[in-house]
Image (cartoon, rainbow, N blue to C red):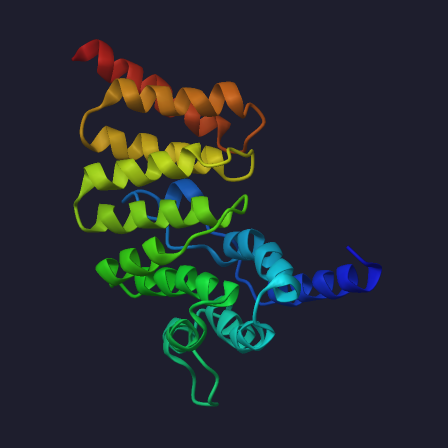
């Protein structure tokens, strides 16, 4: 990447990060097996993706239009991010309608799904998130995870488990895979699949020993193993 291009991308990421609230504590926010996208986590996942595609996407106009919608989302102005704001800036729905064939339009589907999830429109969230397709390190796995969250809210636990498994298995990495594995284990517990839950927690312990989730993984694995011995 050229020096000038790298400097612009770094500045964009700084601007995005400056508007984020603190990332929410994972375990406390997952008591109901749903995580509604902490702003800090979202910025970390998406800043690089969006910055990269700003320069390599098929349609620069679409990517420029998307910047304000992203900022509205980061400021937790979810409805404006989804549907456009009073200043005439497009929302993610507009970007999908007008530029759906571009990389920015594809990414807008992810954002739209995240917005619908936060608004409690779970079926719409699933539709948008399933429409997103990526091959990056982070965003596709995140989409799978959010689909799982939406299915949990709809009490479709088996579908949720399937998507949480996809999130956990997609390009494993130390930054986010441990979180997905914990969420998978917690979902498995709800249907008394204690052995599978213990295995999910065990993957955190064996594959990501320096993860911040390691202590929770050990605690949950011990709990699952106790339940296995009592069954």
Q: Is residue 33 visible?
A: yes
Looking at the image, residue 50 lies above or below residue 83: above
Residue 88 x, y percent position in the rendering: 46, 89
Q: Is residue 25 visible?
A: no
Look at 45% across and 67% down and name the residue there.
101
Residue 213 as seen in the image, left or right of residue 58:
left
Residue in front for this viewpoint, 145 or 5: 5
Residue 154 as seen in the image, left or right of residue 105:
left
Name the quarter where the N terminus is drawn.
Answer: bottom right
* Residue that extends furthest to the bottom in the rendered view of this protein: 87
Residue 206 x, y percent position in the rendering: 50, 18
* Residue that extends furthest to the right in the rendered view of this protein: 3
Looking at the image, residue 130 lies above or below residue 28: below
Looking at the image, residue 147 lies above or below residue 79: above
Q: Answer with the quarter of the image where residue 226 lies.
A: top left
Residue 20 as seen in the image, left or right of residue 227:
right
Look at 41% across and 59% down and name the residue there.
110
Look at 22% across and 59% down and name the residue there.
123
Name the quarter where the C terminus is drawn.
Answer: top left
* Residue that extends furthest to the top in the rendered view of this protein: 229
Residue 94 x, y percent position in the rendering: 40, 78
Q: Answer with the quarter of the image where residue 210 lies.
A: top right
Q: How many marks?
A: 0
Residue 18 x, y percent position in the rendering: 63, 65
């Amino acid at each position: 990447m050229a020096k000038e291009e790298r400097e612009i991308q770094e500045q964009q990421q700084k601007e995005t990060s400056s508007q984020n609230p603190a990332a929410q504590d994972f375990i406390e926010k997952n008591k109901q097996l749903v995580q509604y996208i902490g702003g800090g986590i979202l910025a970390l996942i998406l800043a690089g993706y969006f910055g990269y595609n700003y320069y390599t996407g098929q349609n620069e106009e679409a990517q420029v239009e998307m910047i304000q919608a992203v900022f509205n989302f980061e400021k937790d102005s979810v409805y404006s991010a989804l549907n456009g704001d009073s200043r005439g800036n497009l929302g993610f729905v507009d970007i999908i309608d007008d530029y759906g064939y571009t990389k920015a339009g594809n990414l807008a589907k992810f954002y739209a799904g995240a917005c619908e999830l936060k608004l409690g429109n779970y079926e719409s969230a699933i539709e948008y998130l399933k429409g997103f397709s990526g091959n990056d390190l982070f965003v596709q796995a995140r989409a799978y995870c959010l689909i799982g969250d939406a299915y949990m809210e709809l009490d479709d636990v088996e579908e949720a488990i399937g998507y949480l498994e996809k999130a956990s298995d997609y390009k494993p990495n130390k930054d986010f895979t441990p979180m997905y594995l914990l969420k998978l284990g917690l979902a498995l517990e709800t249907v008394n699949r204690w052995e599978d839950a213990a295995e999910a927690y065990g993957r955190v312990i064996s594959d990501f020993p320096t993860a911040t989730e390691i202590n929770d993984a050990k605690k949950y694995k011990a709990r699952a193993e106790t339940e296995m011995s009592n069954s």
